[in-house]
Image: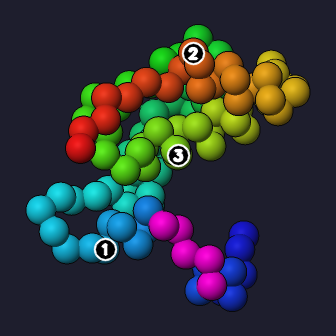
Amino acid sequence: MSSLFEQACNPDVLSCIANLSNDEVFTPPEIANQVLDMLPQDLWSNPDAKFLDPACKSGVFLREIAKRLIDGLEPIYPDPQERLDHIYHNQLYARFHA
């Protein structure tokens, strides 16, 4: 758990973006994680699972999914670089919109 000092001095950039007012509505990381918490927990340790964000803006969902996969796939891919390569090349997909 991060300290209050770390939270105050190192804010999550996506949380900051979520609070900006303009035409777009960004999903705060906390909400993205609440949505992801509804999925089966064994999903995060499945190296064959694929995730698509078809309307990706800030990438918050894919970032939070990647964090979960990084932890969940460690027993299968103990080498951190091999694990990241697998996740980013085989599991996460997005269609970015400007």
Residue 57 in sight here: yes
Does the magenta stretch mainly form a helix, a strand or a loop?
A: loop
Residue 51: image quadrant is top left
Q: Residues within 10 Å of mark 1 (few under 14, many from 20)?
A: few
Q: Which mark is residue 42?
A: none
Q: Which residues are magenta?
A: 9-13
Image quarter in which the N terminus is found? bottom right
- Residue positioned most to the left: 23
Residue beneath disc 1: 19
Q: Position of residue 21 (x, y in %)?
A: 19, 74
For the point 59% across and 26% down, the residue is 88
Q: Quadrant of residue 56?
A: top left
Q: Earlier in the sequence, mark 1 or mark 3?
A: 1
Is residue 66 or residue 45 the one in the foreground? 66
Element assignment for label 2: helix
**Magenta residue check for 12:** yes
Percent x, y of residue 30: 44, 61
The answer to whether 10 is drawn above or below residue 67 in the figure is below
Taking the image as shown, residue 71 lies to the left or right of residue 44, namely: right
- The residue under label 2 is 90
Q: The disc labelled 3 sits on which kind of residue?
A: Glu
- Residue on which the image places disc 3: 64
